[in-house]
Amino acid sequence: MSDTPQYPPVPPQAAQSGLSDNAAGALAYLTIIPAIIFLVIEPYNKSSFVRFHAWQCIFLYVVGFVIGFVNVIPILGQIVFLIAVLGLFIVWIMAIIKAFNGVRWEIPLIGRYAAKQAGI
């Protein structure tokens, strides 16, 4: 007999589904790529919470793209652009925090379109 203690075998672990819905919803906002991935990959595309935040991220990026065109207007357009980008950044941070905390927060003006696309 050896001096090493004998432990019972460890039962096999059930396969985990990956990220929680809160983490996936928050990660969807990091760039547009995770948002698209979460809309395609199971089990995330089955969760209305994750779909909502993924669509809201996509619409937020579209708004940012449109705001970028204001920057070509000299002086006044650039001032409006800077203020809009700062506001967009604040809304983006708030959306990440709300999603991570499990809140389905609708960004004004684009949240209802995200809910509609997510089937809510």
Image (spheres, grey):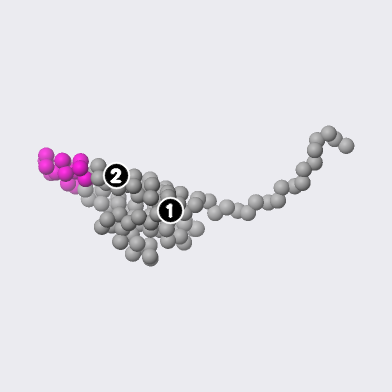
Identity of the residue furthest to the right in this view? 1
Which amino acid type is marked by label 2? Ile
Marks 2 and 1 sit apart, C-alpha to C-alpha, by: 18 Å
Q: Secondary structure at mark 1?
A: loop
Residue 68, percent from left and from top? 22, 46
Q: Could you tell me which quadrant the N terminus lies in?
A: top right
Indicate the position of residue 46 as horizontal and vertical percent values: 46, 61
Viewed as shown, does residue 52 lie left or right of 81?
Answer: right
Left or right of 63, for residue 102: right
Q: Give the magenta part as a residue range.
A: 68-84
In terms of sequence position, does the residue under pointer 2 or pointer 1 come before the other? 2
Name the residue: 80% across, 38% down: 5
Q: Amino acid at mark 1?
A: Gly
Q: Which mark is residue 90?
A: 2
The magenta stretch spans residue 5: no
Residue 50, labelled with which disc?
none
